[in-house]
Image: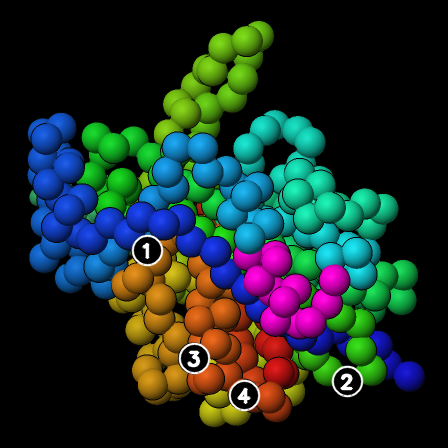
Amino acid sequence: MRRYSRIIGTGAALPARAVGNDELARELARRGVETSDEWIVTRTGIRQRYLAEDGLTTTLLGARAARAALADAQCEAKSIDLLVVATSTPDQIFPSTACLIQAELGTAGGAAFDVQAVCSGFIYGLTVADALLRTGRYQRALVIGAEIFSRILDWNDRATCVLFGDGAGAVVLEASEEPGILAARLHADGSQAAILCAGGRLDNGRVTGDPFLRMDGQAVFRLAVHVLGESALEVLAEAGLTPAQIDWLIPHQANVRILNATARRLGIPTERLVVTVDRHANTSAASVPLALDAARRDGRIQRGQHVLLQGVGGGFTWGSVVVRF
Ligand code: UT7
């Protein structure tokens, strides 16, 4: 008997405060930073982002998304024996955000750890959880992408600070005889580390290095379009599917131009492309599970359909997962 893993529930959590482009532009103008709704919408498709209030943590956002996914799956937290969190904005150096979320959910005993693959983090986490469930050693996993990127943004750098938002998304993944995850592939190219990084670190009680996110937008854009196309074809071949058989394409939500270019390259009509970057902006590891949850809850994704999930980001990292719902 072949073993698979299946997504049986999804959930999302966003901070209370949505900040539109005009409001953000006014706030930035007070610092002498010039931008506009027109520039942000035309270059990225972003219209608003959610920004965390003081006191909100990655752990709390991740736990909220996890609870929503558990409710959707009609599971109890104590049935989870594997908890994987993708984040680049952990609340502490250690313990892992996964351990902190496990405590927040009031469970103990299962495995819990973080994966760090920046905006590809959820795809990395989902692939690792799928592999562990298929070994037969684990039965039910929570995979969470949770980020508070607003705290590592340089609000004087208009080329990056308008692009990101905060949030968390989660899925419950269960071992099953029925597929499930059909194929998954991960990649990285560490030689491209400098094009998207946050280089700060703690050093003898002080923060040293640059504590803010830095990005060479054009280099990331070019590489993202290239690897998303290649990665999609690779994983579809592994699943024995053609792009025409994909019902919903959910790439990492960084820029609507990257999303459209990927859909075009695969010959997937934009009606089958899930876009949430307009509402959430780029939420790094949270973007794919947030988009997945939105498309499930509004009834677009139906049982039996094929969904292609894709991540790309700092590292440089990328990967794709094909799921049958
Ligand atoms: O999550 C990981 C993946 N991340 C991504 O995929 C991001 C990939 N990159 C991008 O999405 C795009 O490269 C950006 C949205 C970051 C930038 O778009 P672009 O079309 O590549 O613009 P650009 O960097 O070439 O900048 C064009 C102009 C520049 O002015 P000049 O030099 O032409 O006079 C910038 O200074 O736009 C200017 N600019 C802005 N203007 C108003 C840059 N940021 C802003 C801004 N408001 N916020």
Q: Nearer the viewer, residue 186 or 150?
A: 150
**Spatial separation of the CA atoms under disc 3 and disc 1:** 19 Å
Residue 264 vs 20, above or below: the answer is below
Answer whether labels 3 and 4 touch (C-beta < 8 Å): no
Place of residue 241 in the rendered image (x, y in percent of width and height, measured from the top left): 59, 88
Question: Left or right: 162 with respect to 195?
Answer: left
Choose top left, top right, bottom left or bottom right for residue 125.
Answer: bottom right
**Magenta span of residues:** 65-76
Rendered residue at 91%/84% (across/down): 1
Instruction: State the separation of the CA atoms marked 4 and 1.
Output: 25 Å
- Determine the residue positioned at 32% across, 55% down: 281
Closer to the N terminus: mark 2 or mark 4? 2
Q: Spatial distance from mark 3 to mark 2, Cα to Cα?
A: 25 Å
x then y, percent, for residue 135: 87, 65
Residue beneath disc 4? 302
Query: According to the image, label 2 marks what residue?
Result: 178
Q: Give the Cα distance between marks 3 and 4.
A: 10 Å
The amino acid sitting under disc 3 is: Asp
Q: Position of residue 62 (x, y in %)?
A: 56, 49
How many angstroms separate mark 2 from mark 4 (CA)? 16 Å
Count of numbered labels shown in the rendering: 4
Q: Nearer the viewer, mark 3 or mark 1?
A: 3
Residue annotated with mark 3: 298
Tell me, yes or no, if residue 35 can be seen here.
yes
- Measure the C-alpha gap from mark 1 to mark 2: 34 Å
Q: Nearer the viewer, mark 2 or mark 4?
A: 4
Left or right: residue 127 compared with residue 205: right
- Camera-near label (3 vs 4) is 3
